[in-house]
Image (cartoon, rainbow, N blue to C red):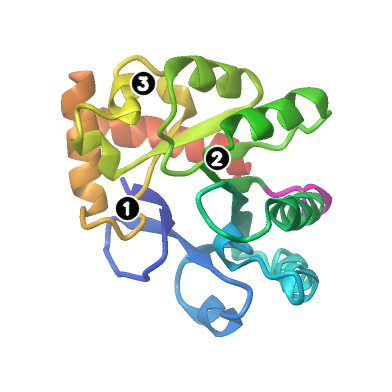
């Protein structure tokens, strides 16, 4: 049974690993790799002059059957890029994801309230996966109520992090794991998660595989 790595920027090969490799709009050649993909315009890369053309590349990529999600896309208040333009790019990618019926992998930094407020007032039904989730339990609960999933990775190795505290009690039916090029293998992330929840790694793999099939309708 495979480990699911829901978000990584670097292709790697493993006989028991299913990758969702994140691509940016200018990397179409990588779609030839033996993996599944997400394609999105990262908020760090949003540019007033180019974002519309890049989002069009995202929209085209979503027609590829190997691309199972849009993203990572989202909002980040810690970068200098215009927050207004970030929002425009995010909503354009969201429209593309909805039109192709593919979930979104969300990059969210200091913007949980904005994204949650939008999710609440909209009639969106497709899942959002908050990669590198690191917010408090209240935010987690609200996101799960709105058909969102939380992805955990290297923050599980920091017992002082919000992610660690939330993961101890979160509904495992709404969880994914990722490497995100943070220095830990996906096997290490699963093993750490299993230790935190006092369960077997094999049982966790079964649960995440179920989540994967449900979220992506595979």
Q: Secondary structure at mark 1?
A: loop
Query: Which residue sits at x=62%, y=61%?
Result: 81
Q: Earlier in the sequence, mark 1 or mark 3?
A: 3
Judged left or right of residue 202, residue 123 is right
Q: Earlier in the sequence, mark 2 or mark 3?
A: 2
Q: Earlier in the sequence, mark 2 or mark 1?
A: 2
Residues packed near mark 2 inside 10 Å, few (<14), some (14 to 19) or many (20 plus) = many
Question: Which stretch is magenta?
Answer: 98-102
Q: Which disc, if any, is residue 166?
A: 3
Extreme-bottom residue of the structure: 29
Judged left or right of residue 197, residue 178 is right
User: Of residues 195 and 208, which is closer to you in this image?
Assistant: 195
Q: Secondary structure at mark 3?
A: helix
Identify residue for label 2. Answer: 129
Snapshot quadrant of residue 146: top right
How far is mark 1 from mark 3, CA to CA? 18 Å
How far is mark 2 from mark 3, CA to CA? 16 Å
């Amino acid at each position: 049974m495979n480990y699911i790595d829901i978000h990584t920027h670097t292709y790697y090969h493993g006989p028991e690993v299913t990758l969702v490799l994140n691509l940016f709009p200018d990397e179409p050649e990588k779609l030839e790799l033996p993996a599944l993909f997400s394609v999105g315009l990262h908020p760090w890369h949003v540019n007033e002059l180019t974002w519309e053309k890049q989002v069009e590349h995202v929209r085209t990529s979503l027609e590829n059957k190997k691309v199972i999600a849009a993203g990572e896309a989202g909002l980040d208040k810690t970068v200098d890029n215009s927050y207004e333009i970030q929002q425009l790019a995010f909503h354009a990618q969201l429209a593309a994801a909805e039109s192709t019926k593919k979930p979104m992998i969300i990059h969210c930094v200091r913007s949980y309230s904005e994204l949650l407020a939008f999710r609440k007032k909209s009639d969106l039904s497709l899942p959002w996966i908050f990669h590198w989730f690191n917010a408090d339990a209240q935010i987690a609960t609200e996101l799960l109520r709105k058909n969102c999933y939380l992805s955990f990775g290297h923050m599980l190795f920091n017992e002082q992090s919000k992610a660690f505290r939330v993961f101890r009690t979160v509904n495992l039916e709404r969880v994914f794991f990722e490497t995100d090029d943070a220095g830990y293998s996906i096997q290490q992330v699963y093993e750490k998660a299993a230790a935190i929840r006092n369960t077997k790694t094999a049982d966790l793999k079964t649960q995440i595989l179920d989540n994967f099939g449900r979220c992506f309708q595979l």
